[in-house]
Image: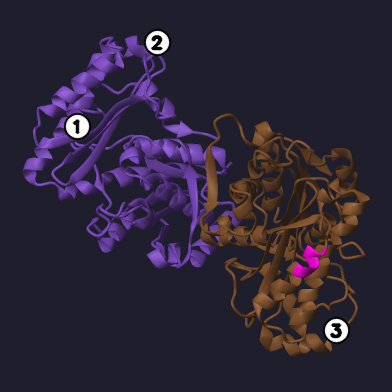
Chain colours: A purple, B brown
Amino acid sequence: MQIFEQIASMRQACRELQQRGKTVGLVPTMGALHDGHLSLVRAARAQCDVVAVSIFVNPLQFGPKEDLAKYPRDFERDCRMLLAEGVSLLFAPTVEQMYPPGASTVVHVEGLSDKLDGKLRPGHFHGVTTVVAKLFEIVRPRFAYFGQKDAAQLAVLRKMVRDLNMDVELVACPTIREADGLALSSRNVYLSPEQRKQALCLSRALSRVQTLAAAGEHRPATLLCATRQIIAAELAVNVDYAEIVDPDTLDPVHDLQRGALVAIACTVGATRLIDNVLLPPMKARHWSKAARQPATRPGQVPGVAAHPDERRLTRWTQ
Amino acid sequence: MQIFEQIASMRQACRELQQRGKTVGLVPTMGALHDGHLSLVRAARAQCDVVAVSIFVNPLQFGPKEDLAKYPRDFERDCRMLLAEGVSLLFAPTVEQMYPPGASTVVHVEGLSDKLDGKLRPGHFHGVTTVVAKLFEIVRPRFAYFGQKDAAQLAVLRKMVRDLNMDVELVACPTIREADGLALSSRNVYLSPEQRKQALCLSRALSRVQTLAAAGEHRPATLLCATRQIIAAELAVNVDYAEIVDPDTLDPVHDLQRGALVAIACTVGATRLIDNVLLPPMKARHWSKAARQPATRPGQVPGVAAHPDERRLTRWTQ
């Protein structure tokens, strides 16, 4: 595995591979890797000749009162994990490399960036779109891999790619969960054992929504009410948002005919956690009932079955 | 010459050439071509295997009260001119191709976009950076050619390319002028014969600045005063701005030690015209005096000699 800190050398390595006809897949990360990231790496490895991973804790996407300073970092452990996964190129630039003094250009997806996490974290998504646009320019990947767990980020990045005619295909990979349902996140290390248990109310609430929707409940307000009741039962957990939205526009939906994204953000102590599920379109809902089985694959909220239509949004081709 | 209206087909044609190892040079234009544009095409042809030209009157860079509707368009004449210059690829998308309903992503160079033309045309430069970013994504040129006449645009685009790590080299080409000094512009067709004469005060004022600077005058305020006096003598011409700035930051300079950009924008009737010259660094100024000869090359303001240092900014390599 080659490790690059310099933009120019990373770019050169990628160009040389591309000139030899190799397909490069990029997995952008902020390090502190877990099985969720590794699932992205595996998806890239299955699809591309060469897997490039970036590790960069992007200051532009953190608000002034957020956890930039304490965000978990363990570069050597990350390297070992990526090496074991057969990653070829690791790009780990410094902040000075990515944002030299005076850098002031931003890529901004207007409208979409102010919804869900963007509403509570002003400027967050323009930090994300700017750094991802830069990484795409440096690497020029054919495919880039992101977790479905960051559903709003995915919607914003899809729109950026489409609006700016970027020549890359975004691949969304299912959320990876612990056996008890907790969605993997680098921020889970902030949780005390007690908070860790309290945090389960997110996946429990989403699982309940899936069950109700599979049983025919199609009123977003009713589903959200059930969600909030489950979270409200955990007194230490506060809801930032709980919404049922169109997965592309992030606007609230009024019915579930065409499927929807159920997205939750909560704070548990000082830790902010997000989670979501995709509800399949109503017309396919009968399938879902028939298929209700214990979870069998990663990314599935325990207790509710995988639904093939949940994958309809996992790839977006320009 | 192949003509493409569709983004996908233009992209594919460019990728096929690039896979065969061809260097593609891009000349982005808004059509209504003149010798200024053709000088860019010739520069591209001299440097690249394949020249691609885009013609797109970009609505995003026009203000609501500007001349979008009446901007001169003559596609067939443009095609004939480009064919005669050996252009291989012409990209002429519709507005709907470039901005489908709902498109909302912008590339914004903060700070720089509010200076010079950006100050008087709010939103103009984010229209420019957004469309150029899109064209770069579609074509992926190795080199892209712009006129030095649009000096503020050049500064903004250079910053965009640098900040976003775009893998393209911007090439600035000298301003092309009529024999009497008027800088070529598609908007010159708006001028009546009388206005055409009045408009000469722009190049006359810039020529005067060059003469004074070559003679040792190094106080920006004095140079600007001379400029404004010449323009004030044309009662029908109003100054939008007349500034002496750093060509990269567009901030006013307080001395000319390191050279400077002298930029003017005026309205003549309803027509807005811009023009500029680059002053060489002071330390090289003695050379300039010795070299004072009648203009011998295109882009030179008549009456003041070319200075080799004027070219120091004509290429910017990432």
Kindly report which numbered mark, 3 or 2, lies closer to the viewer in this rendering: 3
What residue do we see at 73% from left, 56% from top? B25
Front residue of this view, candidates B187 and A24 = B187
Kindly state the secondary structure of the residue where label 1 is placed: helix
| Residue B238, image x, y percentages | 75, 56
Mark drawn on residue B292: 3
The residue carrying mark 2 is A283
Say whether mark 2 and mark 3 are on the same chain: no
Kindly report which numbered mark, 1 or 3, lies closer to the viewer in this rendering: 3
Kindly state the secondary structure of the residue where label 2 is placed: helix
The residue carrying mark 1 is A202
Could you tell whether B49 is left or right of B97 in the image? right
Mark 1: amino acid = Leu
Q: How crowded is mark 3: few (under 14 residues within 10 Å), some or many (20 or more)?
A: some
The question of residue A301 being in magenta is answered with no
Specify the principal SS of the magenta part.
Answer: helix
Looking at the rendering, which quadrant does residue A193 occupy? top left
